[in-house]
Image (tube, helix red, strand yellow):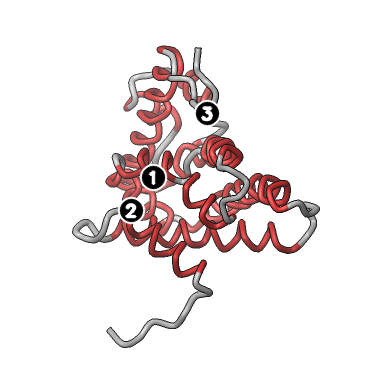
Amino acid sequence: MPTAGTEPVPGRRDRRKRRTRAALTEAALRLVAERGLAQVTVEEISEAAEVSPRTFFNYFACKDDALVGDHTGDAARLVARLAAVPPEVPVLTALRTALDELIDEVRTERELWRLRLEVVTRNPALLPRLVAGNAEAERAVVEVVAARVGVDPGHGYPALVAAVAGAAWRTAMTRWATQPDGPELADLTDEAFAALAAGLPQPGPS
């Protein structure tokens, strides 16, 4: 039994499901990066991941979903981690802390994130789905931030915090994915959130 303040260790079934989802995502990204979005089918993705098309649809509603990432799962984990941060911690600091688990996962998949960025850049048709996924994640964060600071979710502050924190995270991710010899993702995320907390001071000449 997990104790208070700890998270349950994923069981064998959950680990298997994560591996299958990851294999489908990797297959989709690699095939689309090689051939283009229109030239890849769900059947080909499934074959490359060594599962059936029926299994594919247990994880994703369509090919595009396999390419843009699991925003719903990421948002759920982020919200759970954010809710667990003590209420006296400032909101931006709490959000940065809540990203630790996601950072640990992402940093082991640099090549996949680089491929995702390449695929989305080459295929603008994916952008609406990506934007919708980001908006869904931000709405989930708004609810938790509103409860944390004691205001209505319709108040402007939670929405603004969720938007700028999301932008900081995406900026750090893009820099990390495109700079193989650059700083670690955690350091880039720290830098982005520190700039937000300081009011985005203008940097001096480099």
The amino acid on which the numbered mark 3 sits, given as a three-letter code, is Gly
| Residue at image coords 61%, 56% | 162
The amino acid on which the numbered mark 2 sits, given as a three-letter code, is Leu
Residue furthest left as drawn: 181
| Residue at image coords 53%, 51% | 95
Labels 2 and 1 touching (C-beta < 8 A) = yes
The answer to which quarter of the image holds residue 83 is: top right
> Which of pointers 3 and 1 lies earlier in the amino acid sequence?
3
Q: Is residue 72 visible?
A: no
Crowding around mark 1 (Cα neighbors within 10 Å: few <14, some 14 to 19, many 20+) is some
Crowding around mark 2 (Cα neighbors within 10 Å: few <14, some 14 to 19, many 20+) is many
Classify mark 1: helix, strand or loop: helix
Classify mark 2: helix, strand or loop: helix
Q: Is residue 187 left or right of residue 164?
A: left
**Residue 103, numbered label:** 1
Nearer-the-camera pick, 76 or 7: 7
Vertical placement of 10 versus 122: above or below? above
At which x and y percent is residue 126? 51, 51
At which x and y percent is residue 78? 54, 41
Q: Circle 2 sits on which residue?
A: 185
Nearer-the-camera pick, 65 or 157: 157
At which x and y percent is residue 61? 57, 32
Crowding around mark 3 (Cα neighbors within 10 Å: few <14, some 14 to 19, many 20+) is few
Q: Is residue 206 left or right of residue 122?
A: left
The answer to which quarter of the image holds residue 76 is: top right
Q: Nearer the viewer, mark 3 or mark 1?
A: 3
Residue furthest bottom as drawn: 205
At which x and y percent is residue 155? 78, 60
Q: Nearer the viewer, mark 2 or mark 3?
A: 3
**Residue 5, numbered label:** 3
